């Protein structure tokens, strides 16, 4: 496993990351809200990248995992800024961002802002705009600064300017992000190459062995040359 290193950001933020060198494309994993880069999906993807001989970058947002800062100070805008900086300063060449839950929201923004670099995108239980539709579901536990930041980065109300292939994986039994959000994301994406895989009985975390197998098959399919 690659050692932890740190990326210096403004305001004395130090962003922890692990970077596996390898061939292109580089996989980039974006964790969900209050998650970090050491979860089961991230580790499985890192092992996958090692077997395939391709690069892999994963990081902890400020206030999470091994990064500096307080979680309560985190906002979507700040974490997107950190994600863009990590990609720009630590990687070269084509990318496949893989975002889990909130990380999928970040991955979609990254793909729209770095279209020449993003070769494909994978969203796992993708949760764009959860500061918006989550209010309707009565969800709590999101700090006010994060909610306000999220409202400035909403995507589902219009076309999502992403043209690369997109693969969405969602659990049918996801109790946190309704399956309808995956369908709304699929409809909003400008790309003509969007596929949604629904795992029967799958929950939000998508960390069971069968879930991870489905995720790795999805990523492997994006690495195969077109026939």
Image (cartoon, rainbow, N blue to C red):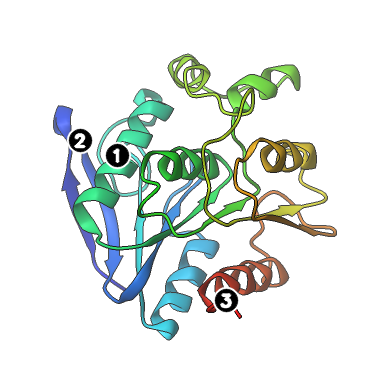
First in sequence, mark 1 or 2: give its number: 2
Up the image or down, 161 lies above or below 157; here it is below
First in sequence, mark 3 or 1: give its number: 1
Task: Tell me: 169 left or right of 119.
Answer: right
Q: Which residue is mark 3?
A: 226
Q: Position of residue 11 (x, y in %)?
A: 16, 27
Residue 74 visible in the displayed image: no
Q: Position of residue 75 (x, y in %)?
A: 40, 26
First in sequence, mark 3 or 2: give its number: 2
Badge 2 crowding class, 10 Å Cα cut-off, few under 14, some 14 to 19, many 20 or more, is some
Q: Position of residue 154 (x, y in %)?
A: 55, 24
Q: Position of residue 72 (x, y in %)?
A: 39, 25
Question: How far apart in space, not on screen, are marks 3 and 2 (Cα)?
Answer: 41 Å
Cβ–Cβ below 8 Å for labels 1 and 2? yes
Q: Which mark is residue 82?
A: 1
Task: Tell me: 13 left or right of 139.
Answer: left
Cβ–Cβ below 8 Å for labels 3 and 1? no
Q: Which residue is mark 2?
A: 13
Which of the two residues, 153 or 2, is positioned nearer the viewer here? 153
Q: Quadrant of residue 68?
A: top left
Q: Identify the element where label 3 is drawn.
A: loop
Number of the front mark, 3 or 1? 3
Task: Tell me: 56 left or right of 2.
Answer: right
């Amino acid at each position: 496993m690659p050692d932890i290193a740190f990326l210096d950001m403004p305001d004395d933020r130090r962003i922890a990351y692990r970077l596996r060198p390898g061939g292109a494309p580089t996989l980039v994993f974006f964790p969900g809200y209050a998650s970090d880069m050491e979860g089961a999906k991230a580790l499985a993807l890192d092992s996958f990248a090692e077997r395939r001989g391709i690069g892999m970058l994963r990081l902890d947002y400020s206030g999470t995992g091994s990064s500096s800062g307080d979680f309560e100070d985190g906002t979507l805008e700040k974490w997107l800024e950190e994600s863009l900086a990590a990609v720009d300063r630590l990687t070269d060449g084509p990318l496949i961002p893989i975002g889990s839950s909130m990380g999928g929201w970040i991955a979609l923004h990254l793909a729209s802002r770095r279209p020449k670099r993003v070769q494909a995108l994978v969203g796992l239980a993708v949760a764009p705009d959860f500061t918006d539709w989550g209010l309707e579901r009565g969800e709590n536990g999101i700090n006010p600064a994060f909610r306000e930041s999220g409202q400035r980065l909403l995507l589902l109300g219009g076309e999502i300017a992403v043209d690369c292939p997109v693969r969405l994986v969602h659990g049918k039994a996801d109790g946190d992000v309704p399956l309808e959000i995956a369908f709304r994301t699929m409809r909003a994406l400008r790309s003509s190459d969007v596929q949604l895989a629904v795992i029967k009985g799958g929950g939000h975390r998508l960390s069971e062995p069968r879930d991870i197998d489905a995720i790795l098959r999805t990523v492997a399919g994006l690495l195969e040359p077109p026939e």
